[in-house]
Amino acid sequence: MCGISGIVSRHTQPALEDLLELQRSLAHRGPDASSHYCKGPVALSHNRLSIIDIDTANQPFFDKDKSLCLIANGEIYNFSDIRAHYQKHGYSFTSKNSDCEVIVPLYLEHGIDCLEKLRGMFAFSLWDAERQKLILARDRMGEKPLYFHVSQDHFVFSSELRSIASSRLVDTSVSHRQIARYFRYKYVPEPHTPFEHVQKLPAGSYLELDIATWSYEIKQYWSPWDAKPVIGNPTEEIRQSLEDAIKTCIVSDVPMGLSLSGGIDSSILACMLTEYSSKPLQIFSVGYPDAPEVDERAQAKQLADRLSQPFHDIEITDDYVVDAFEDLVFSRNDPISDISGFSYLVIMRKAHEHGVKVMFQGHGLDELCWGYPWVQDAVLINEGKWYKKGKRSGFRETRKRIVSELKGFLKKNLKNDKRLRLFEETPATQFIDQNYPQFFKPEFIEQSSWSTPDPIAEYGEASDRIDLDITRLIVEYYLAENGIAQGDRISMASSIEMRLPFVDYKLVETFVGLRKHARDDQLPPKHLLKESVRDLLGDEILNRPKRGFEPPVHAWYNALLNAHGEIFENGHLENHQIVRRDFVDKARKPESMSRREREVAWAALNLEMWFRSLDRSSEASLDEWHTIG
C-alpha cells in the first residue's frame, strides 16, 4: 500500500523539486520507503507502506529492457497464481514475492487488457517509453484513489487531492458548482473535485496519455452493471461469494485488525477472518459516554471473546471531537462532512498504536443489500413520486399494493419525467434545497446553478429496472465517496491499509447478477444476506436493530461550532463569496439553530477547515499525524 505521484512535461524535463514536493506530501501513505524515477519527459515517485514482501519489493519495477516503468499503490490479491504462471514460463522477477510486480509481465503479454487479469485494489502508473505513452489505472470499485490535472504544458497526477493541489503546476481555481454538490451530499462525487481543473480518474477506468499528440483518453474497462444474471440459489450464491472474497484478501506479512460494531456486516467479517486466517485479529470497537442507545461495545466484545480474539475498547468524548477536528479534516484530504469520520479516525490511530498495518472494515453490504430503508423507498418514489413513506408494518404486502397502484399513476402523470431521484428524497437534502437562499450568497447561488433541478446530472434517466438504477446510484456515489474514499484517506493518514472484502468485484457481480434475475427490493432489508449467514451468526446478532457507527451527532455539532466557529471570521467561505454573513453569525450560536440548520452549519465549518488544511505544510512529519488521542 503506497502513495504514487508523477509529472509529465510536454516540452522540457520535469523539475525534480516539483516531483519531490508531490512525494513529500504523500509521506504518510508510505513511511517505509521512497524512491523516484526521472527520465525524459516523465518523473514518477513512490512512497511505500510495506505489507507484502517487506524486504525486496521497493518500487519502481521495470521490464528487462527498462522500457516499462511501473509504480503502483494497492494489493493484487491473486498475484501468487500470476507469478507462478510467469515463473513457469521463464520470466525473471526482481523481487522475492511482490504482488504489484506481476503487472509488468501481464502488460507485456496482454497490453491494457492486463487489467482484466487483476483482482484486488490498486491504482498504478505505467510509463511505456517505447510507445511514449503514460497509463494510469484504477481498480474496478475505486478502492485506491488517483487524481490528475492537465494543462498545455504539464500532466500531473497523485494519490491524494491535497498533494496535487500543493503543486505549483496545478490550477486550483475553485468550482462553485462542485461546492454546491458538497453541501447537498456531504462530498463531491467523482470524477469531480472542488477544483475546476483537477479530476478523479473514475473507478474501473484507465487513462492513456499520448506524449506526441499531447492528448489523453479515459476508458472504462469494467462496470458492475454489465454483470450477467445469476440464476442459482440466492443464499448459496451469496455465502459462497462472501467466503471467496474474504479468503482472497487475507494475504499479509504484517499484523491485521478489524473495526467491529455489534452489527451484521462486521460480525460476518470477524467470524470469517477468524476461520480462514491463522493470524490473530486485533478487534477495535468505539463507543460514547452516556449514550447507550448508540454504543455497541458490549456486543462487539461478546463476539470477540467468543472468537478468542484480542479486543480494544475505545470511547470518544465531546472534548476529543473538538480537539481532533482539524486533524480529521486534514486526514480525510477530500472535503467530506460525514460526522462518523471521528469514529474511523480514533480507531485507525488506536490500531496504529498497537502495530496494526492492515485493517478490515465492512463497507459495501448496506449499499448492495438494501441496508438503508430510505434507499428501498427511493425505488417506490421513482416509480411514482406521490408515494409518501409511512409505517413499515405489513412490509411486503404494503409495497406490492403500492407498486400496483403506482403503475397507472406513473403512466398517466409522470410519463415525461424520467430523471432519477435518490438523495433529493432524504430530509437533509430536501431541507437545503428548500432553504438554500438563507445560507448562501446570491453570487454563489448564481455561479453554482443551485436552482437548476439537477443535483448530479450524471444520474441519467430511469430505466425499466428502477431497483438496479437506485443500486447504481447508492454504490457509485454514496459508497464510493462517503465509504470507500473516506476510509482510505483516514486509514492511510495513520499509515494503515484498509481492506474492504465486501466490495470485491466478484461479490458485487454476484449481488447485481442475482438482482438482475429476480427483484429483491420488496423483501425486508438484507433478507437474503441474513439467510446466507444465519448458521454463522445466529439469531441474536441477526435480529439486532441496525445502528452501526452512529455518534451523539447534535452534541458534537454544538461542541464543534462553539469551539471552532471563529474560523469563519474572514475565512475562505467569505472570500469565495459562498455563505451569507448572517448565517455564519448564527452558526456561532448553534443552540439557537434547528437540527437541520446545524447540519448545514457543520458542513460549512468542515469546508472552511478543509480550505485551511490546504495551507498546512506538506512536509509535516508522521508524528504530527498522531498528536491526538
Image: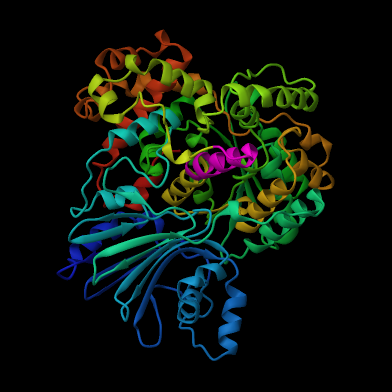
Q: Residue furthest top?
A: 592
Q: Position of residue 448 (x, y in %)?
A: 30, 30
For the residue pair 222 and 256, the one nearer the viewer reads as: 222
The relative height of residue 174 versus residue 100 in the rendered view (above or below) is above
Residue lying at 41% horizontally and 34% vertically, measured from the top left? 324
Q: Nearer the viewer, residue 212 or 426?
A: 212
The answer to whether residue 567 is seen in the rendering is no
**For residue 2, side relative to residue 580 (left or right):** right
Going 43% across and 60% down the picture, which residue do you hit? 219
Instruction: Find out whether residue 472 is within the magenta segment.
Output: yes
Q: Residue pushed farthest left?
A: 12
Q: How is the image coloured?
A: rainbow
Vertical comparison of 212 with 410: above or below: below
Quarter placement of the C terminus? top left
Where does the image place residue 247, in percent across and percent down from the top left?
69, 62
Residue 591 on image: x %, y %: 42, 10
Q: Quadrant of residue 286?
A: top right
Q: Would you place residue 223 above or below residue 94 in this image?
A: above
Whether residue 376 is visible, yes or no, is yes
Residue at image x 25%, y 29%? 447
Q: Which residues are magenta?
A: 462-481
Instruction: Give 152 or 21, whichever is nearer the viewer.
Output: 152
Q: Overall secondary structure of the magenta stretch?
A: helix
Q: How many marks?
A: 0
Residue 312 lies, in percent from the top left, at 61, 43
Tell me, yes or no, whether the highlighted magenta stretch contains residue 141.
no
Frontmost residue, 134 versus 626 = 134
Q: Residue furthest front?
A: 412
